[in-house]
Amino acid sequence: MSEQRVASRYAKALIDLAKEQNVLEAVKTDIIQFQRITKQNVSLQTMLKSPVVNNGDKIAVLKKVFHTGFNPMTLSFFAIVVRKNRSAVLESIGEAFLQQYNDFNNIISATVKTAQAIDAEVTAEVTQFIEKQSGKKVSLTTVIDPSLIGGLVIQIGDNLYDASISGKINKVKQNLLNTYISK
């Protein structure tokens, strides 16, 4: 069975259990924190994916790293996943969980890239625009990319809206090249 399929099934089970026990928001917070910490800690990623490290040691490390502030149900879920020899897909389970959580709550993820930091007012306007266009709530991530020169780039799923100066320069450049090549 593919990793994505396994991750999706475990994520669905976790969401169902969290809803049943009325701790969905707490589990979501735990998963976000787990994703953040594992992305920052390569040795933790390696340990979880290693077939050499036994499951008992993996569970002990997870409990030691995540015991503070984590919902006991989340830690128990992690332990079950490790005991089932699926610790290598914990990160994928986290991603699948967040995607399913967003689907359940009618939320879409969007990323806005700008050349400089944008203030809260602009962020709110962009969020409102996306919500109006999509009819869904928006989870907005902002990224600073000085190579854009100015303007912004919005990514929603597979859709990319480029209203940056560098994007416009590239379009003009491409048009000039196409015109030159066609003659």
Image: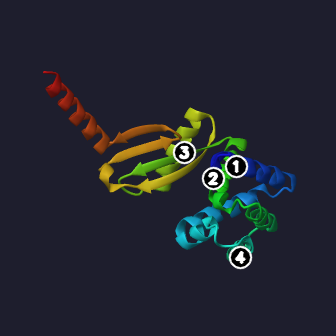
Res 117 → quadrant: bottom left
Q: What element carries label 1?
A: helix
Distance between the alpha carbons at the discs numbered 1 and 3: 33 Å
Distance between the alpha carbons at the discs numbered 2 and 1: 12 Å
Q: What element carries label 4?
A: helix
Question: Looking at numbered disc 1 in the image, what kind of residue is underneath it?
Answer: Val
Could one spot residue 118 in this view of the protein? Answer: no
Question: Looking at numbered disc 4 in the image, what kind of residue is underneath it?
Answer: Asp
Residue drawn at (18%, 31%), measured in percent from left and top? 177
Residue drawn at (61%, 67%), measured in percent from left and top? 50
Q: Which of label 4 and label 3 is nearer to you? A: 4
- In the rendered image, the vertical position of residue 138 relative to residue 54, given as above or below: above
Question: Is the C-beta separation of discs 2 and 4 under 8 Å?
Answer: no
Query: As drawn, is 25 to the left or to the right of 162?
Result: right
Question: Looking at numbered disc 3 in the image, what kind of residue is underneath it?
Answer: Thr
Q: Where is residue 42 in the image (x, y as percent from the top left)?
A: 53, 70
Q: Residue furthest top?
A: 183
The numbered mark, 2 or 4, whose residue comes first in the sequence reads 4
How crowded pointer 2 is (Cα within 10 Å; few <14, some 14-19, many 20+) is rated as some
The numbered mark, 4 or 1, whose residue comes first in the sequence reads 1
Distance between the alpha carbons at the discs numbered 4 and 3: 44 Å
